[in-house]
Image: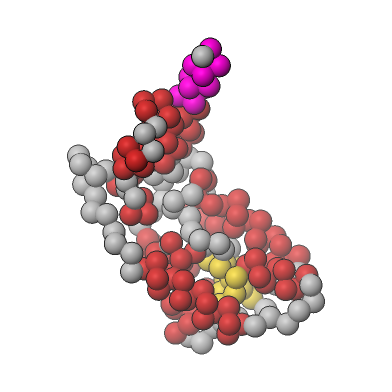
Amino acid sequence: MRLYLAGPMRDHLAFNFPAFHKAAAGLRALGYEVFNPAEENERQDNFDPTRDSPKALDYYMARDLPAICTSSGVAVLEGWESSQGARLEVQVAIALGKPIFSVHSLLSDCQNGKELDFTKNAKALLERGSEVAKEPVVECDLINHPSHYCIGGIEVIDVIEAWALGYRLGNVVKYVARADHKGRPIEDLEKARWYLDREIEKRGRG
């Protein structure tokens, strides 16, 4: 059986490539053939998830959606319903009559020798995707609502103020939140660590 692997990328550290690779390895160990988009990004585009910025969504859809047509089904990673691309992939698979699986359930059921309930998984996961798709989207603009600070419909400034994080911890959250969306993830994470170290040092002295 050939499975297409779908899941969130853009809002995750290293574009969630480690999770994609781990899932692909686990499924292949069970005898599945796997189409892994993360591997395609690395192979075709020489994409480095710790350094490079992604191309537009339509580029990846044009390249990857045909693979769904030749797959037996789609296996989704946790959090797929928050990803526009993964939702599109699931919708295409369902339109083609392909079953949808949860990677976690697929691995667990196979390892335990249980029969997989394809239809139940597909319906449950699609319902989750529909609910998330209805959530309001924050309108972003460069000055008041920069896109790298309002990922997923939540603005970083709202979190910082609601939690009363203060200057140092606020900067930790700010740099971590934008790390995968401004093109310099390592630099932003190092800045976040610097502010976190300052906070730890201050509390240690107190």
Question: Which residue lies at the image location 48% right of the left edge and 85% below the top edge?
Answer: 96
Q: Does 96 sit above or below residue 126?
A: below
Question: Which residue lies at the image location 39% right of the left edge and 38% below the top edge?
Answer: 163
Coordinates of residue 19 in the picture (x, y in percent): 60, 54
Does the magenta stretch mainly form a helix, a strand or a loop?
Answer: helix
- Report the number of numbered marks: 0
Q: Of 148 and 59, which appears nearest the observer? A: 148
Magenta span includes 200: yes
Q: Of 144 and 20, which appears nearest the observer? A: 144
Instruction: Please say whether residue 63 is visible from this viewpoint.
Output: no
Q: Is residue 206 left or right of residue 31?
A: left
Coordinates of residue 100 in the picture (x, y in percent): 56, 77
Question: Which residue lies at the image location 53% right of the left edge and 12% below the top edge?
Answer: 205
Quarter occupied by the N terminus? bottom right
Coordinates of residue 89 in the picture (x, y in percent): 46, 72
Q: Is residue 99 left or right of residue 148?
A: right
Q: Does 37 sit above or below residue 156?
A: below
Question: Which residue lies at the image location 59% right of the left edge and 74% below the top edge?
Answer: 101
Q: Does 150 sit above or below residue 169?
A: below
Instruction: Please say whether residue 12 is visible from this viewpoint.
Output: yes
Q: How is the image coloured?
A: secondary structure
Q: Which residues are magenta?
A: 195-205
Magenta span includes 88: no
Q: Of 27 and 126, which appears nearest the observer? A: 126
